[in-house]
Structures are given as structure tokens and as C-alpha cells.
Image (tube, rainbow, N blue to C red):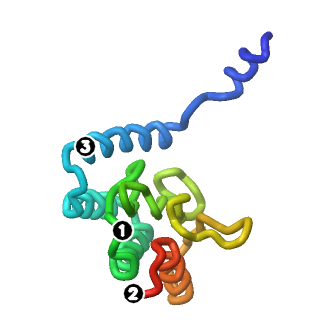
């Protein structure tokens, strides 16, 4: 058996959740092409996505949305791979990832490379979320401000 055959037998490709996320992303790209930089359309899509989430993720995602829109209002709400996300100049800065969608043991809040979080030669870009308490919210607010290069908010 060739190495290619062995690799093909080991890998089953993308999971159903990953395939669904890619289909969601394709739909999002088509919708973005039609709507352009319509913040209201992005807000509607994001709110619809949050509304479909099971608890406790729905509450976490809604609270994260409040934090982002209050402390980083420059970011445009949208969906990204079927999850809530926020962009600046068309580039995703931060996003919420549902544990339920990907059958993970925790949700996460992450930042892409367009976020200005640089801190030396190594820094975290994603954070596991089991719940949002005051300390977690304070840390998220500080990260949001740093990510968009703002000290106000």
C-alpha cells in the first residue's frame, strides 16, 4: 500500500461541522458582496446567529456583543463561518466560537492577526470561555481596546 493510500485511509476529510461552517462562509461571502459594508445587515445577521445558539452560549455571545459594540464601536458586526465576528477595514479582528457548533468542551473568544495584540515575541490570541464574570469581562475589554488601538471606551 502506498503512502498516499495510507494517508487517505487515515484522513476522512472535514467533519460535518467543518463542512457546514465552510458552507456558511460561502453564504456570508455572497451576502457581503450584495450588501457591501452595511453595518445594519451585519448586525441583523449576527443577532440571528446568536438567537440560534443554545444556552449558555447565547447569553455569552449576546454579552460579548455588548462589550464589543460598547468598547470597540469601530468594529463592524458580521458573521464568519457561521459565528459572530467583528471586522475593521474588512478584516476580522475578533470572533466568538460556539462550543456546541464544533462539539468542543468550551466556547472561545479569539483574535485574528489584524488585532493589535502584539506583546513581545509570543502572546495569546484565543481564550476559552465557560462563563463570563466581571474579571473575564474586564480582561476582554482591555483586549478589545488594545486590538483596535484605542485607550478610550
Q: Give the quarter of the figure containing the N terminus.
A: top right
Residue 151 percent across, percent down from the top left: 47, 85
* 84 left or right, relative to 147: left
Q: Which of 146 and 61 is in front in this view?
A: 146
Cα–Cα gap, marks 2 and 1? 13 Å
- Up the image or down, 6 lies above or below 110; here it is above
- Up the image or down, 67 lies above or below 121; here it is below
The part of the image, by quadrant, that contains residue 148 is bottom left
The part of the image, by quadrant, that contains residue 67 is bottom left
* 10 left or right, relative to 140: right
* 127 left or right, relative to 17: right
Q: How many other residues sit within 10 Å of disc 1, few (<14), some (14-19) or many (≥20)? A: many
Cα–Cα gap, marks 2 and 3? 31 Å
Q: Which residue is under mark 1?
A: 75
Q: Which residue is under mark 2?
A: 153
Q: Nearer the viewer, residue 91 or 15?
A: 91
Q: Which residue lies furthest to the top in this view?
A: 1
Cα–Cα gap, marks 3 and 1? 18 Å
Would residue 59 be seen by someone viewing this image from the given angle?
no
Q: Which residue is drawn at 78% across and 17% down?
A: 3
Q: Give the quarter of the figure containing the C terminus.
A: bottom left
Residue 40 percent across, percent down from the top left: 19, 63
- Up the image or down, 152 lies above or below 101; here it is below
Would residue 121 be seen by someone viewing this image from the given angle?
yes
Query: Which callout, 2 or 3, points at the residue further toward the start of the chain?
Result: 3
- Up the image or down, 91 lies above or below 151; here it is above
The label shown at residue 33 is 3
Mark 3 falls on what kind of element? helix
Residue 20 percent across, percent down from the top left: 42, 40
Query: Which callout, 3 or 1, points at the residue further toward the start of the chain?
Result: 3
Residue 140 percent across, percent down from the top left: 51, 78
Amino acid at each position: 500500500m502506498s503512502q498516499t493510500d495510507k494517508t487517505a485511509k487515515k484522513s476522512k476529510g472535514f467533519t460535518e461541522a467543518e463542512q457546514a461552517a465552510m458552507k456558511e462562509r460561502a453564504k456570508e461571502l455572497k451576502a457581503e458582496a450584495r450588501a457591501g459594508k452595511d453595518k445594519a445587515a451585519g448586525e441583523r445577521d449576527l443577532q440571528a446567529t446568536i438567537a440560534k445558539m443554545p444556552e449558555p452560549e447565547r447569553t455569552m455571545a449576546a454579552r460579548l456583543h455588548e462589550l464589543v459594540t460598547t468598547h470597540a464601536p469601530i468594529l463592524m458586526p458580521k458573521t464568519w463561518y457561521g459565528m459572530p465576528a467583528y471586522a475593521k477595514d474588512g478584516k476580522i479582528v475578533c470572533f466568538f466560537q460556539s462550543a456546541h457548533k464544533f462539539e468542543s468542551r468550551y466556547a472561545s473568544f479569539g483574535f485574528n492577526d489584524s488585532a493589535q495584540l502584539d506583546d513581545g515575541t509570543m502572546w495569546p490570541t484565543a481564550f476559552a470561555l465557560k462563563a463570563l464574570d466581571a474579571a473575564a469581562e474586564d480582561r476582554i475589554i482591555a483586549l478589545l481596546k488594545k486590538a483596535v488601538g484605542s485607550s478610550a471606551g
